[in-house]
Image (spheres, helix red, strand yellow):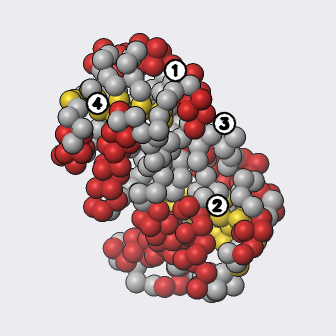
Amino acid sequence: MKIYVTDYDYPSLDIERSEIQKINAQFIPTQSHTAEEVIANCRDADALLNQYTIITNEVMEKLTRLKVICRYGVGIDSIDIEAASAHGICVVNVPDYCIDEVSNHAIALIMTCWRKIAYLNTCIRSGIWDYTVARPLHRFRGCKLGIVGFGKIGREVARKMQPFGLKIMAYDPYFDAGDMTNMGVTSVPFFWLLREADIISVHTPLTEETFHLFNEETFTAMKETAIFINTSRGAVVEEVALVHALQQKKIAAAAIDVLEQEPINQGNPLAAMDNVVLTPHFSWYSEESEKELKHKVAMGACEVLLGKIPTYLVNRNVLENISLR
């Protein structure tokens, strides 16, 4: 059995190697960043561990031994799920390794924007010692937090923010409104949330439905005093529309951990704005979460190659075409 890594930016793959050795499989790291490179370098793969490379139908057609693709992370938008199911290939992700980290990071960004901490820090470093440059600031308690996407991370943000005395609402068409109410959160329609929320925090996956969910129309619907937070996926936001909304003061501020183009392009207007906080797509990161991610990615490959239904199977319909116990 051969388990290939398509691509990686980790300094070490020792955790994966150790896990895979337990099933006596070969572990073969590569740096294959295109479909053509994956086909050339991983042709006899039984399993792929995948970080960033796009895994297409063509790749799956050429890798005739392939049984499972394991994604380093939560999002699986880089993998053609429909094609995988058609080819009898399991797709596995790790949906629970960084819930604490991402929810904490989103809250840190909320606080940073609400209290204008990054802006005041910049002012002080440039010689301005004057709190009035941050006017107006408003009391946090009683403001309205709108959460878009009420999955594991969105729910954890809501839970952690409740002691601050906020009014918390959420939009998620796939989550039961009654269950949301039981958690102390009000289920609201999308545009209602946009109009009412003082803070909007995005926690939705990237799908055809959510691609550019935030655009000129949705930013225009928000309060001019609204703060916008995104720790989900860059392409959920139409970046040009976000820049325009900030420049035209349609919203007050933004804090962004994920961009449509990463790393950030030199000259990106967001990097020059005083009312924008940027972090380099690392809300997922802690030493502990990275270790958990690497362990679970390797575990997913091993489970399938041992004939087991993987713990974190994404495309459960594939079980109709393959035999796993």
Instruction: From the image, tell me which residue sits under label 1.
Output: 87
Q: Amino acid at mark 4?
A: Ile
The label number, if any, that marks residue 3 in the structure image: 4
Name the residue: 71% across, 65% down. Answer: 170
Q: CB of mark 4 within 8 Å of CB of mark 1?
A: no
Instruction: From the image, tell me which residue sits under label 3.
Output: 208
The label number, if any, that marks residue 150 in the structure image: 2
Label 3: few (<14), some (14–19) or many (≥20) C-alpha neighbours in 10 Å: few
Please report whichever mark, 2 or 3, sits nearer to the chain's N-terminal start.
Answer: 2
What secondary structure is marked by label 4? Answer: strand
The answer to whether residue 40 is above or below residue 112 is above
Comparing labels 3 and 1, the label whose residue is closer to the camera: 1
The quadrant holding residue 160 is: bottom right
Q: Amino acid at mark 2?
A: Phe
Q: Quote the CA–CA distance across marks 3 and 4.
A: 30 Å
Q: Quote the CA–CA distance across marks 1 and 2.
A: 31 Å
Q: CB of mark 2 within 8 Å of CB of mark 3?
A: no
What secondary structure is marked by label 3? Answer: loop
Please report whichever mark, 4 or 2, sits nearer to the chain's N-terminal start.
Answer: 4
Residue 262 located left or right of residue 15 = right
Name the residue: 42% across, 52% down. Answer: 281
Q: Amino acid at mark 1?
A: His
The answer to whether residue 202 is above or below residue 108 is above
Label 1: few (<14), some (14–19) or many (≥20) C-alpha neighbours in 10 Å: some
Please report whichever mark, 3 or 4, sits nearer to the chain's N-terminal start.
Answer: 4
